[in-house]
Image: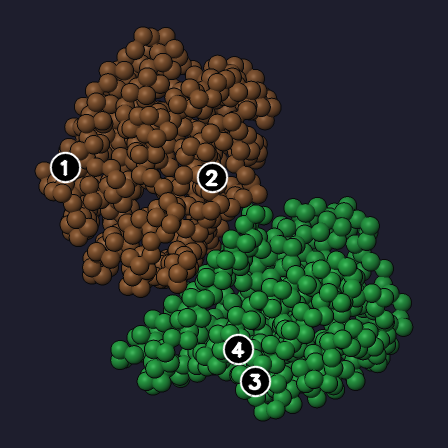
Chain colours: A green, B brown
Amino acid sequence: MNASFEMLIGRMQELKDLGGLIGLATWDQQTYLPKKAGTARAEQLSTLQGLYHERLVDPRLGEWLEAVTPADADGKSMIRVLKLERDRAVKLPARLVKELATAQAHGLSAWLAAREANDFAPFKPALETLLQLRREQADAWGHDGERYDALLETYEPGMRVARLSPVLKALTQKLVPVVQTILERPVPDSAVAGKRFDGNAQWDFTLQLLKAMGFDLAAGRQDKSVHPFSGGTHPLDVRLTTRVNETTPMPAIFGTIHEGGHGLYEQGFAESHYRTPLACAPSMGLHESQSRLWENMVGRSRGYWRYFYPLLQVKFPAELKDASADAFYATVNTVSRSLIRVESDELTYNLHIVLRYELELELVRGNLSVADLPHAWNEKTFELLGLRPSHPVEGVLQDIHWSGGDIGYFPTYALGNLYAASLWKTAREQLPGLEADIARGQLLGLRDWLREKVHRQGFRYFAEDLVKHVTGRGLTDEDFMAHVKAKYGELYGVSL
Amino acid sequence: MNASFEMLIGRMQELKDLGGLIGLATWDQQTYLPKKAGTARAEQLSTLQGLYHERLVDPRLGEWLEAVTPADADGKSMIRVLKLERDRAVKLPARLVKELATAQAHGLSAWLAAREANDFAPFKPALETLLQLRREQADAWGHDGERYDALLETYEPGMRVARLSPVLKALTQKLVPVVQTILERPVPDSAVAGKRFDGNAQWDFTLQLLKAMGFDLAAGRQDKSVHPFSGGTHPLDVRLTTRVNETTPMPAIFGTIHEGGHGLYEQGFAESHYRTPLACAPSMGLHESQSRLWENMVGRSRGYWRYFYPLLQVKFPAELKDASADAFYATVNTVSRSLIRVESDELTYNLHIVLRYELELELVRGNLSVADLPHAWNEKTFELLGLRPSHPVEGVLQDIHWSGGDIGYFPTYALGNLYAASLWKTAREQLPGLEADIARGQLLGLRDWLREKVHRQGFRYFAEDLVKHVTGRGLTDEDFMAHVKAKYGELYGVSL
């Protein structure tokens, strides 16, 4: 081991520690920060992010990355991953970084104002500026003519429009008629409507669910926040949040299972990867595959509720005395037409994503203007979901993402759903009796399988390569379609 | 304003932000950090402290500090304070900083092992190393022949042994006979012994106390920790902790009032000082004066409990039905011989401090060896308190401070008590009806007086200069002695 390698490892650890501290300050901001400290925290975060950036673009780091040739594969991967991040940071002119930060702050307040007024107009100029800056950013990063690829790379390294678009197109073509068929069937009665579910009892139940998944509460915690998220500072300090709504237990339950899936990923990194660039998921889509696998494939399965529903009834004996486990299972899998992405079900969710992906792709390509976006949003919503938003808050203004210029982010949700289905299929093949185990509340076999196959790999491979390695298939809509056809066909009594 | 001044202000803000983030990571470490993340957090903190140090000793900062001549007094004070901190950091060789960090880590584990074994021996070599390094550090910082001055400067800038020792000597000579007289009187019955005090009710009551003091819970918060402390990230984000013991409400109540006093100081800095070196108390002694003033002068006064005791009875109607407000007042002011500093009362507390101060001063001077320390401790305890420890855990091993090499820290507690008494006397002179207000639960007048006289001054002046400016007197034992003589004479029915 030479001096450069030691310096390089030291810098990797420093960057990871700073990233962890950014995680802490962000977590705190959304959980315990006193109301008046918002600006102070923004300043602290900006200082910390500035230092992170400075250490990352430091020319000496560039020299060390060139000088070092590690003997083992993990060392090589660390260098590859850090180079990927550094090269992109170095390519951005300081002027653009600054303009983007300003435009993001302005975008958020303009979006909030537009929502307040229920009018797209106040948001339009802010989005135009953000879009223009993102296009400049894409050009600074470089691409093969498809600017969107450079933006997508931020969230989904290695993925390209040329690979993604055909898969999402095929998925959409298959999904639309399936949704149509299901929506013609009668909607099952809700097992939870009109009741009150004590917040403390809900909270205790979500902790039971986390423990059953094998989330280590000595190496992580759960708190409450307005919008559930997962984060933390280190694989031994993973922080989840959920929200509790006393009129229905669903947000707490599925928020916890979803974030718990993310949390298991973060807790599952190999110890030898701690404080290195490898203790990181290779993409947001693969991260989302873990939350969606737990939330939908496990947490919305009949077997899961066979075991957990009686435990939920213990918490809510009066509220749930008239509803069976099967009725609860039907309730958590109700398919409905919704205009709102975050309220949509497993089946229609991907259509909401396709809507956003296709629109933002055309925005970046310059084939769609921001002025025409609200109309295009409404038209495409009708085409995909058979509904028309009656006002912008339930349409084009519903998501926060674009207000921060997050373009290229949405498709990672769909990638998560597709990867989850493929991993789930392979897990069932490789773990005989998995579904029977789940129906007995035994979830650790699945956690350990995911840990070995996915989590411990860290960022050794790009997401699709890792999935291919595990499942034998790359990105495909087939496993997802097979999953939903089997599940919803059975549940709704139709052949799909 | 020239370029250097802008750079300087930017660096001041950066340093303050990093300090705030260190505050966040430390607060979290003692409140919410998952059990397994201890090492990870220590690494993160070490990285952050390293960056803070790097930015502080940066030669460019030295140049800016020389180049800039601000027009206004606050600008000049900022430069003076930052220079003070930077000069000391620059003077330390990197080798010494590193050796100290190692010795501190080792000191803590040796101290824990010694306590575990109830034997001073395992701690002895670690303390010798720490003492040696602190002497080297004092020499690196520079002094006029009294090494202890250089160490004291860390906690109490501007204070010197030549000033401090005579005051503490006079205080001791007056205090010992007063304590002796009181201890000959019968001990009042406890108003709380043998009861159980529900933790949630205690918690709610402490929040009532904080609100009554004028602690702004929208610019701060209270949580639980094993050892109460105050900290936070910014004057608008001040974090207190308290602890709840269900066998007695005293630790929660007085922990809250004490930390609340610190918290008011932190919330009281002038807005124009935010993110500058002036948003800082000039010494730990002055900081402690605020916690002690609230804890002892206000929180252990008869008037305070005239108002708050009925509110406490509302929380604990059964537990407190037989005890009067006067009985409760007597209980919270019980004087007793104790070997343990943290359990000692307002009257004997300073004697515990004098014990430690005199011993550590002789250690630093080389007049006392670490080998002789346990014997010297026991002798001096007998001399000052009339008791002899029967084993080291209730003697020389009781405090954590020396295990981290914190030498020069203890006297700040006594300084806090003395400054508190002088400020309290002046407040009563300048705020007619103050004690009547307190007896009606009206505490905001006192908070505002302290805010104007002390908190908003930040680090414009050294502690004793500020106290002199407010009270007309510098450091003195007289106001403290007058306070305890009047209070305990009345309470114990003796002439002191």
The answer to whether A21 appears left or right of A70 in the picture is right
Position of residue A391 relative to residue B388, above or below, is: below
Q: Residue at x 31, y 14 (%)?
A: B182
- Which chain's residue wears label 4? A
Task: Judge the density around disc 1: few (<14), some (14-19), many (≥20) Cα neighbours within 10 Å.
Answer: some
Q: Are marks 1 and 2 in contact (CB under 8 Å)?
A: no
- Quadrant where the image shows the N terminus of chain B: bottom left
Residue B362 marker:
1
**Residue at position x 19%, y 41% in the image:** B149
The answer to whether tags 3 and 2 share a subunit is no
The chain carrying label 2 is: B
Reading the image, the residue beneath label 3 is A139
Between the residue at mark 3 and the residue at mark 4, the CA separation in whole angstroms equals: 23 Å
Res A243 → quadrant: bottom right
Which chain does tag 1 point to?
Answer: B
> What's the amino acid at mark 1?
Glu
Label 3 to label 2: alpha-carbon separation: 49 Å
Q: Position of residue B85 (x, y in %)?
A: 29, 51
Chain of the residue under label 3: A
Question: Are both tags, 2 and 4, on one chain?
Answer: no
| Residue A282 marker | 4
At 33% from the left and 8% from the top, the residue drawn is: B494
Q: Quadrant of residue B330?
A: top left
User: Which of the two discs, 2 and 4, sits closer to the camera?
Assistant: 2
Query: Which mark lies nearer to you, 4 or 1?
Result: 1
Give the labeled residue for mark 2.
B268
Question: Do circles 1 and 2 both sit on a common chain?
Answer: yes
Q: CA distance from mark 1 to mark 2?
A: 38 Å
Give, as a three-letter code, the residue at label 2: Gly
Secondary structure of the residue carrying numbered label 2: loop
Give the CA separation, mark 4 to mark 1.
Answer: 59 Å
